Amino acid sequence: MPDIASLEGDPAYDVTWPWTSGEALVPGLTCVFRVRNEARNLPWVLPPVFSAVDHVLVVDNGSDDGTADVARDVAEQCDAADRLTVLDYPHQVARAGGEHLATPATSVHSLTHFYNWCFSHVRTTYSMKWDGDMVLTPEGAGILRDLAWQLQATRAIVAMPRHPLTVVDESTGWLDLSLRFLEPWVYPMGPEFTFVKAFDWELREFPPGVERIVLQQGLVLEVKWLDADEYAHWRRDGVDFTNTRLYRKLREFEVDEAIRNGDPEALGGLVKVTAPAGVHIIDHVSRDWLWRQPRPLVQHSLPASLKNRAPKERVRP
């Protein structure tokens, strides 16, 4: 893919790929965060990532909670300040769904342009897209650390299941094990692995025949806080939830509502976990509870009314 000039004509936010200038990428894995107001999560999210990858790139998209400063503080605590890059992307980015669809792909307000701009700053041969609410377990960090160097001789992409954990309070959470969704997170860097515009969000392309490595369950938690608006970046009205990835989003909406309404058991597929005294629920689930569960993790059945609406996972060839 060639460089991409921003529609608004701001050269600071043009996408300039290293390969267009002949810059050689160095062997390694860079984890790319695109974050807004994730200061609360980063003390859990960043340490295992620093232990698993060569470099961390945090792109702050207009946070007002000190996200960038927290990232720097955590890096210092992990003795990884030299492996952290923090960039600022000040433009408001269209929300997934209808806003994204209506925004030109090369606009600085487009999810597609935003993602390409973020990943254009990677200087290693592999990159990992990661969210500011995703917590690697110690087992997950170890597997990624061992896998990262083995990937260097391949052009594989890596997918791993993630398990949503809704935090009710410091000792209580609801873990959703009902759906199995395998999104690729780790990709080679190169002109065949860039982002294009899809209907509801950006989509990372990859050529036919690329090997797809699927990691086991129980390596990643996706943290949701019941006392926060976890869906501000989404538009629910007018969104078609019949495709696989969008059904997952609908499931998240319904889990959130069921817990708020005090009736999560009626929804089905949720497991209540209580942490021991003095242990935070995120620490308990990520460091102890998940590790002790038999594999494969129990996939709790959904009620028939939900099961009939849930499409089967579709894997891109």
Image (cartoon, grey):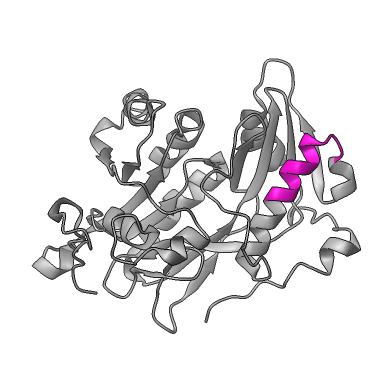
Left/right placement of residue 192 relative to residue 284 reads left
- The correct choice, above or below, for 103 with respect to 173 in the image is below
Q: Residue at x 16, y 54 (%)?
A: 10
Magenta region, residue range: 253-263
Q: Which residue is drawn at 38% across and 63% down?
A: 103
Name the quadrant containing residue 117: bottom left
Q: Is residue 220 magenta?
A: no
Q: Is the magenta stretch mostly helix, strand or loop?
A: helix
Q: Which residue is drawn at 74% across and 51% down?
A: 177
Location of residue 196 in the rendering, given as x and y in whole percent from the top left corner: 37, 71
From the viewer's side, name the closer residue of 241 and 159.
241
Quarter of the image with the N terminus is bottom left
Name the quadrant containing residue 194: bottom left
Q: Is residue 262 magenta?
A: yes
Asked whether the viewer can see residue 176, the reply is no
Residue found farthest to the left:
21
Location of residue 45 in the rendering, given as x and y in whole percent from the top left corner: 48, 36
Left/right placement of residue 275 relative to residue 79 reads right
Location of residue 161 in the rendering, given as x and y in whole percent from the top left corner: 61, 57
- The correct choice, above or below, for 117 with respect to 64 in the image is below
Q: Which residue is drawn at 34% across and 29% down?
A: 75
From the viewer's side, name the closer residue of 176 and 232.
232
Left/right placement of residue 94 relative to residue 60 reads right
Left/right placement of residue 280 relative to residue 108 reads right
